[in-house]
Image: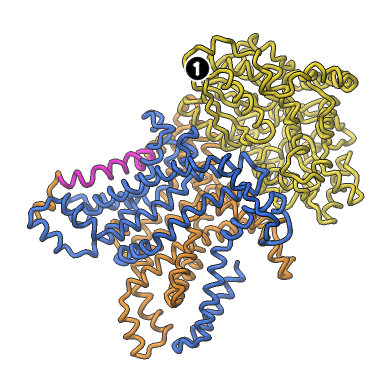
Amino acid sequence: MGAITAQTNQHTAGSKKKKDAASPALKAVLHLILWVVALLQIFPLIWLINYSFLKSGDFFGSGILKWPKSFEWNNYVNAFTYGSVPRFLLNSLFITTVTILVAAFLALMLSYAFTRMEWKLRGPAMAFIMLGMIVPIHATLLPNFILFDKLNLIDNPLSLILPYIAFSLPISLLIISGFLETIPRSIEESAVMDGCSVFGVIFRIIMPITKPAIATVCIMNFISWWNEFIMANTFLTSETFKTLPFSIMKFTGQYSSNYGAQFAVMTIIALPTVIIYLLFTEQMSRGITAGAVKG
Amino acid sequence: MHKLMSNRITIFWLVAPGFLLFLFMVCFPIIMSGYYGTTNWTGIGAYEFVGFDNYTKILFHDGVFWRSLLNALLLLAATLLIQHPLALLFAIFVTHAGKFEKWFRAIFFIPAVISIVVTSKMWVSVFHPNFGMLNKLLEGVGLGTWKQDWLGDPQIAIWCVIVVVMWQGFGYALLLYYAGLQGIPKDLFEAAELDGAGRVNLYTRVIIPLLSPMVRVAVVIAVTACLKQMETVFLMTNGGPANTTQFIGNYLYKTAFSSSLYGYGNAISVVFVIICLIITLAMNKAFKKDVGEF
Amino acid sequence: MRKIWITLVAMLMVFSVAACSSGNNGTNGNKGASPSPTNETKETAAPDEGKKADPVTLKFFTALADRSNGAGKIEQAIIDSYMAENPNVKIEVEALQDEPYKAKIKVYASTDALPDIIQAWGQTSFIKPLIDNNMLLELNESEFDSSNFVPGAKDGFSQDGKLYGLPRGTDFLVIYYNKKLFDDNGLSVPTTTAELLEVSKQLRAKGINPIATNAMEGWSLPIWFEYAAQRHTGDFNKMDAVLKGEGKFSGDADFLAAAQDIAALAENKGLADGFLTADYGTSRNLFGQGQAAMYVMGNWEAGLATDENFPEEFRNNVGAISYPASDKGKATDVAAWYGGGYSVSKTSKNTEAAVAFLKYFFAPENWAKQVWETGSGTPAQKFDQFLTGNETALQKQLVDIFSAMTSSSGTPVHDNGTDEFKTKVMEAHQKLFGKQITPEQFLTEMDAAVAVLK
């Protein structure tokens, strides 16, 4: 790794001196560097998919990538049947969807109150929630378990949804309020003149305008909660509500000698997020652009 | 207008749901931790109060705790000094990549969206001394003598973990800087070109200073992520060998759950939150911004 | 006390095994009518009262995470057949690997919400806090008479004369070896500790990983060290005495010599590359795929010889030996203990149903028979009637080690105290095996761990 970075640094230093002309050679070098790093970033995914088609024993061979002698589709069949993937997939979808929608909704209301409304405690209150960004989730693991047990929420999707939402709020607030600051107030003022209530303003006027920021927040939260497993492992006990990241923990434990199937499960878990991300990548970079510049 | 905007009832309804949830799910548990931190509870049965014994032990006698903190700072340093400059550089490259711009942006971000469970498993395989890709690669290019037991060597393991964390977060940092670049008005580039200013000058003198708000956001996110690091370590090394790759999140989990020192584990998490608070406040001072905005 | 029993039982086994190997056909005939384990159990246990009763859901929490192989597969098969016979009973299984399991059981215990049936270990570190805090149901010993538990097996699950759990198996640590790797390189399987070191050096010189084990989890190392120590002290009891406060580790020439043995092994790279970061699955695969010559693991891995995921060449060549001897300790001095088992939660709303299931589970023809026949371990119940003579060579070797046992270590050292003690002991061992501390420092760290117990 170190060697590679050092190399790219040299390349860039060199290419920068030539600059300006944007000669074809320079362009080629630039593209080469980009492709090398892109490959480094995506290679593990390729490797993952490659090995998901191999037999367990092939893992110990000498090559880095291997063309399978015969495609072991069986690995995927195993993954689907024994790994309970379809059910876990639905659970994950349900839990993350509810989380990101409610979190975006609450964060929007909070952002509005913090950026537009006038009240004495708004500075400290906002700072207070922002501090939540530094609280590690695992610090709340056991106290929350005790709490949920008292509330009878163990093994209930709410035991994940509630903390997920709470931990989403600081970063969502940061992005949405940053975005709100960039929007001129004149639009709302005219709406208020027309007799619109504050809630009306938020949901009829602000929400459509802040769509990029909301989308960004949703995607960022989606990624972090889709992959969360420590809370899921602690708060869920029965198979009924378990989420996807858990299935790989389960699967690697249960089929520890079947590497091929393990890689198949990992591929199945990795692909949905990659696809969803690819579908929304445009939306997301626009959202971050618009929202965070002002920061 | 003013009257409407300072209506207490409206403010209450806007703030209360989110704020209460936050209090209940984030703050309340920490207060509970503070309470359990003063006990010698093992997680089961009765316990006694031991006052501040746990806290003094952490601060003055717990080498692993300080090692964990040091590791977090190492990671932070590597992130800020290596990952972020590279991410910024590549963000600039990507904007010049022509028709492939979107492709690169998407590919670079992919590791960030893949479950850490998956990436950790994968990297453990990559680092495996016998059949791992890294050693095979070194042998393949004739550097067989560089082969290592990457994760088993106490001197090297922490750097491997840091590389993995940086790799995974690279796309995230890149996207933030890329987004920042997109926010810079295009005519600025054109004006500079007309002036005949060199591209390097353009970036170092004009563009990068304009990016500073974005840098601030990226740095804040990096700091919190580094301090909170747990999952990658939990899955790759569980802090081993001999706690050399321990991070506080994992350490407190291990203390509370594997060693059954629940009271002590909670005390760790309280001290940890306080340290994070101090670092954040210091950072805000450095950025000369009020706390509310980071 | 417990050790003596294991040893006695083992000696009894000598006779029964001898009897069996001569009378294969007879035993086969007795049970030949019922080859399929799941179909034959209709008439046993599970009294009728269950059938018409209200629906019952039992939460079953186990650390046998692998449900498709070995013991986990059998556990699941018995659960499935029980549910088929008792349609009103639904058993929800939650399975995690050892360490996550133990972490989660603490979460349950801290909120007094244990599942109905849990896996328990008859070892102080695990079961004592649960018993002391009144969380486990006292079992009626006489109800399980027909299960034929071997004498002493239940001791670890008992406290103050009351029984709180039932053991699933007898465990002992052995060295599995890959005969082909030894033969191909003109090496012979070590019989003394000196040979073990020598063989490791030669394997390493030939570019083969000598010994694999799961040092990331850490529990195999202290048991290994118990062997190394016994080979110098000649007596497993000496270590227990130190734990009780009689004497110390540091300053003791025998313990130092044992630690030096391990250090020498580590120094000569006797341990497989990456062993410190190898978890159970990784180390097992390393050995099973022919990448390491030896594998230090418990006797429950007899399934190595039948696991289809491994190449046939390996399956036909895997064998097991006891830890090599020295002038003080014999190969028949074995680190053996009673391993995992089950307990019932006191707060369970369905204690009766839970106990009924355990009775079914431990009926001789269920667990004991099936676990033995599949080579997934050595039951803690009498199983001599299930010896068929069709066992794999590996199974036979394991039985031989077990039946030749002349003394045993009892509960592994790290499980003889609190969890904090356990963590410290395992970390000290990881450092010793990982060459991060000297043998002297190791003994000092062990003493520091013992100090925690006071």
Q: Residue at x 81, y 56 (%)?
A: C207
- Tell me: residue B7, above or below residue A274: above
Residue at the spot 49% in from the left edge and 12% down from the top edge: C53
Q: Position of residue B163 (x, y in %)?
A: 56, 61
Where residue A225 appears, as percent x and y from the top left, is 43, 48
Q: Position of residue C124 (x, y in %)?
A: 63, 26
Q: What chain does mark 1 sit on?
A: C
Residue B254 image-quadrant placement: top right
Q: Give the residue displayed 56% in from the left and 50% down from the top.
A: A266
Q: Secondary structure at mark 1?
A: loop
Q: Is residue B16 magenta?
A: yes
Q: Main secondary structure of the magenta part?
A: helix
Tell me the magenta residue range. Answer: B10-30
Task: Name the residue tied to disc 1.
Answer: C350
Colouring used for the render: by chain
Picture colour for chain C? yellow
Give the quadrant of the C terminus of chain B.
bottom left
Chain letter for the part of the structure drawn in blue = A
For the N terminus of chain B, the quadrant is bottom left
Q: From the rendered image, report the letter of the chain displayed in orange.
A: B
